[in-house]
Amino acid sequence: MEAVTTEAARTGEDAQIIARRRESMRLLARATLGELSAAWGAIGSKPEVAPVRGPETGLVMVRGRMGGGGAPFNLGEATVSRATVRLATGEVGHGQLLGTDKERARFAAIFDALFQNDAYRAGVEALHEKIAARLDAEDRRKAEETAATRVDFFTMVRGED
Amino acid sequence: MYVAVKGGEAAIANAHRLLADRRRGDRSLPSITIEQVVEQLGLAVDRVMAEASLYDRALAALAVRQARGDMIEAIFILRAYRTTLPRFGYSEPVDTARMKVERRVSATYKDLPGGQLLGPTFDYTHRLLDPSLIGEDAVDEPALKEPGEHVMRVSDILDGEGLIEGDGQMPEGHVMGDLTREPMEFPMARDLRLQALARGDEGFLLALAYSTQRGYGRTHPFVGEVRIGEVEVELELPELGFAVSLGTVRVTECQMVNQFKGSAKQPPQFTRGYGLVFGQSERKAMSMSLVDRSLRTDEFDEDIVAPAQDQEFVISHADNVQATGFVEHLKLPHYVDFQAELDLVRRMRREYEPAQPGGKNVMKEAAE
């Protein structure tokens, strides 16, 4: 996985692998510390994990687009924490998420590495489902709250004729 | 000769100790937590994030608490903090079309796809002080309804008819600027101006925006739409060669639609101003969009006749951290400078007074 180059990655199977890993990382970036540590605790035989980089906190300059879809500009920075780890079995995992929580970033990196290992993938997918279910419920709830504030216009006829 | 005057250390230490005491206030009251500030003073937190130009709710709340609620002080503290962190990179541009919308209103179209979603707004409240908030306030759960269709952009509706200018492009080969990396230079390109406005002082931009409405560089605006909600932040990881999501940030976006402009080559169409701000702040996003439009004088061959059209004036004075630094430094010791000026004015008086009818020849030494 690590050796996948940008060119080769754009086609077929590789693109699917990338799509799955992106989705995995998207969910891991939103996982709570509780979800991550519970999933870690549930792994029977834990692999050895060696830190490669971090965990560390820094900044990412967030960009917007003028007019919403035009030329990009720099909107402002956000705090980001990231970590890279290597499993004893060789897989390298990256974790990166908004905020200053380095422990979550380290866990996200571990689960990214585990996701690439056949022996652990099912466990990571169970964690994905848990995170996705929570996010879906939160999004659904917010969307319903917003929908309740939608204006239903009606017209009133006044005067004669 | 330079003479250093010392002696402030003990006073400064005790002043800071007193500041800490006043910040804590009455010890018989519980101390407020960062979580409480985030949850219950969320819009103060949003303003600090926007003007510090750093998105982090917890750190912004800490800054608000540390600054005793002084917003510009909190912004200053958070802006200073960001200089201690390394820069990991630049995100992909956020896609506001895919925003999880919590509020969206349009003043130009009544019935538009997605509808008018009021969200958590102060609009239509009576602005009456609510005594029930003095004690513990029990609040109803929000009402719920089945969500409707995708919330379409208003600019896309007008764009379909070609009646409005596009989203805005920079000239071919333009390299995007970053205010945090390069010194300011004028004339300043629109991308840099937008960055400066996004972190500019809300009050200053509000006043400038108001001035355009009152005739100082009028642009005849309509709110095409204001939308508030969360957008995804994605960062390309060079070691992997693709972008990954880091999470979401809440932003407020304003699409201001302004009166027409046409030329021999181009048919008349609406022009636009754009506002995008961290957090929930439509006052700031609207002000930003008005000022963005008024500053685009070069693109529309408009004469600069008002402050809000003068980019050097607007951009140089929009940053409240810079502004407060320069204004507030005046209270620091200027004893030597002032003594020099005092000597000068005495000399001038010695030359002036003998020339006056009945003037005194000698002046009393007053301020020594």
Image (cartoon, coloured by chain):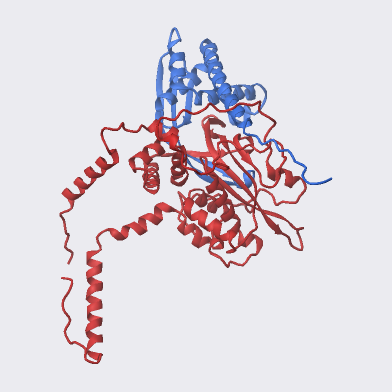
Chain colours: A blue, B red
The answer to whether residue B216 of the structure is visible from this angle is yes
Q: To which quarter of the image does residue A83 belong?
A: top left
Q: Quick one: B88 or A72, which is closer to the camera?
A: A72
Residue projecting furthest to the bottom: B357
How many marks overall?
A: 0
Q: Is residue B68 left or right of residue A88?
A: left
Percent x, y of residue A90: 47, 18
Whether B302 is drawn above or below A140: the answer is: below
Residue projecting furthest to the top: A44
Percent x, y of residue B12: 21, 49
Q: Quick one: B92 or B126, which is closer to the camera?
A: B126
Residue projecting furthest to the right: A161
> The C terminus of chain A lies in which quarter of the figure?
top right
**Residue shown at 41% from the left, 14% from the top:** A48
The answer to whether residue B57 of the structure is visible from this angle is no
Q: Quick one: A137 or A83, which is closer to the camera?
A: A137
Percent x, y of residue B251: 54, 39
Whether A68 is drawn above or below B232: the answer is: below
Q: Is residue B80 left or right of residue A36?
A: left
**Residue shown at 39% from the left, 39% from the top:** B85
> The N terminus of chain A lies in which quarter of the figure?
top right
Q: Is residue A28 left or right of residue A41?
A: right
**Residue shown at 51% from the left, 57% from the top:** B207
